Image (tube, grey):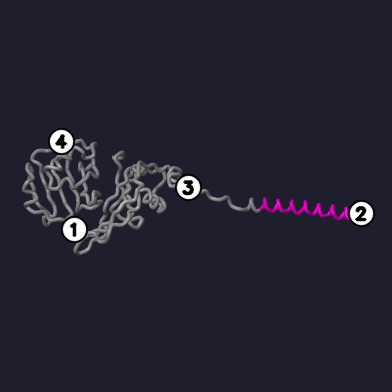
Amino acid sequence: MDWKKTETIFIIAFLILDIFLLVLFIDSRMASSPTPLVSQTLEEKLKSENITYGKIPSDAEKGSYLSTEPLAFTQKDINNLKGQKITLQNANQRIFSFLQKPVKIDPDKYGADLAPFLKSDVFKGDKYTYWSYDKDKMQMTFNQKIDSRPVLFNTDGQIVFTLNKDNEVVSYMQTMLGDTQVFDKQDDVISGTDALEVLHQHGDLKQNSKIINTTLGYYNLVSLPSSDVYLPVWAFEVEHEKQTTYFLVNGLEGSVINTNDTQAVPSEEAK
């Protein structure tokens, strides 16, 4: 017997067997390993949940904590407001005005046709910006601006116009915040898209929702004996099943603010 040839055959056979067993081992490991998860972008996540939205600011901005308090109006502040019957209320912190000649407006223009009246016939009216129109109450609300950003969900910095059935402004109520004091140097405010991702991860956005509006403003975080503390927040106006809800995200810390002030209200479509 040719043992050398036999030895060679055995070596080749064992080598083939080893290769075969190695292939089986690799196949079994690959079959048992979980399929790697593909990371989804925020846009893909929202799309998969049928959450729609318009343009949302993606640039980072600057902001800081600040303090202020309600302004007490003086007689001098209202002396030049003609064609109005004005009274000061609530320790002079509220102006109530009844217009002798109503101002005709179109509620669908988002307060644009009230701009001339605000500038000429309301005390520092150019410091306010349109916020909302309540069709049931026939009231249009403008919020005061701090650093070009609206003060949100605060009756201490608002003008509320009351309309009659002919869409004419017949009266208004005005409050105002005084000078502001910055607590610290301005810091980075997260972008609107980052705030949206925070809100989504928090689980507040339901499937089939629609983000109607996104606003960067100031929110009253806490009230102190001497003044109130405000911080920059992102406010998301979200519609779901004919209900509109406002959600707030802290622009400095990137956390969701839980507040009863942003409770759901009927959407315009449901009214």
Looking at the rendered structure, the kind of residue marked 3 is Gln
Residue 177, image quadrant: bottom left
- Secondary structure beneath dot 2 equals loop
The residue that disc 2 covers is 2
Indicate which disc, 1 or 3, sits on the residue closer to the N terminus.
3
The residue that disc 3 covers is 40
Calculate the distance from the C-alpha at mark 3 to the C-alpha at mark 4.
50 Å
What residue is shown at x 36% (from left), y 56% (from top)?
A: 254
Calculate the distance from the C-alpha at mark 1 to the C-alpha at mark 4.
33 Å
For disc 2, the neighbor class at 10 Å (few under 14, some 14 to 19, many from 20) is: few
The residue that disc 4 covers is 104
First to last magenta residue range? 1-28
Indicate which disc, 3 or 4, sits on the residue closer to the N terminus.
3
Looking at the rendered structure, the kind of residue marked 4 is Lys
- Secondary structure beneath dot 1 equals loop
Q: Are marks 1 and 3 in contact (CB under 8 Å)?
A: no
Q: Is residue 235 left or right of residue 156?
A: right
Residue 218 lies in the magenta-colored region: no
Calculate the distance from the C-alpha at mark 1 to the C-alpha at mark 3.
45 Å
Indicate which disc, 2 or 3, sits on the residue closer to the N terminus.
2
Q: Is residue 95 left or right of residue 1?
A: left
User: Which tag is nearer the camera, tag 3 or tag 4?
Assistant: 3
Residue 132, image quadrant: top left
User: Which tag is nearer the camera, tag 2 or tag 3?
Assistant: 2
The residue that disc 1 covers is 69
- Secondary structure beneath dot 4 equals strand
